[in-house]
Image: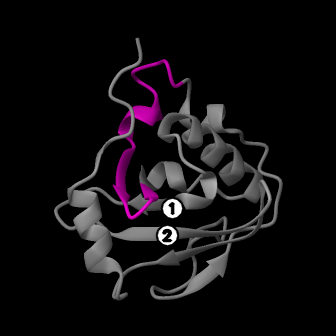
Amino acid sequence: MNNTNNFYTEPANTSFNVQEVASGIDTFDVFGDISDPLSAWYDMRVAEMAGFDYLFVPEELGDQLQSRETVEDFLLQSQTLLGAEPERTTILTYTAGKKPSFKRYNAEWAGSYIVDLSVASLENSAQLEFIQMLFEHSEKLVLSIE
């Protein structure tokens, strides 16, 4: 796939670093106000296993997580909802459909900052079946806020 922002230009089964550009996009711009039932927060799903939270984000939203700062902000906002450490939360983007595809965001933390961030396709990976199972058993991240 040839994308003009060069974010997803690598072939499947490879890992690549997220662009080191200031995106100027914050979590509110991408996902909206969490108290708004029409916001993207209500499209996300979560599964918990072995002390980790697996956060499933629709790919079109995940495509906007292109800087460490945006991912940090997103994980810190998610931590409020999940009650978990951002270091124990894994972001996965998914495409909707009969057989969804997944990409995993791999973040390396130093204190409360991400020092390295890469995205890897999970197509044909050993983790694919496990991630598909988690996705099938995931629940909506936000049901309602009153």
Task: Decide: is 15 above or below 109.
Answer: below
In the image, taking residue 49 as reference, residue 55 lies left or right, namely right
Position of residue 66 in the picture relative to residue 130 (left or right): right
Q: Where is residue 98 drawn, in percent x and y?
A: 16, 62
Say which label, 2 or 1, has the lower sequence index. 1
Relative placement, left or right, of 123 versus 133 is: right
The magenta-colored residue range is: 34-54
Q: In this view of the protein, which residue sits in the foreground, 53 or 36?
A: 53
* Callouts 2 and 1 close, C-beta under 8 Å: yes
Disc 2 and disc 1: Cα gap in Å? 7 Å
Q: How is the image coloured?
A: one colour
Number of the label disc, if any, that sits on residue 90: 1
Q: Residue 128, image x and y in percent?
A: 32, 79
In which quadrant of the rendered image does the C terminus lie? top left
Q: Residues within 10 Å of mark 2 (few under 14, many from 20)?
A: many
Amino acid identity at mark 2: Arg
- Residue highlighted by disc 2: 104
Q: Residue furthest top?
A: 146
- Foreground residue, 127 or 112? 112
Q: Secondary structure at mark 1?
A: strand
Residue positioned 50% across, 35% down in the render = 81
Amino acid under label 1? Thr
Circle 1 Cα neighbour tier, 10 Å, few/some/many (<14 / 14–19 / ≥20): some
From where the camera sits, is residue 71 visible? yes
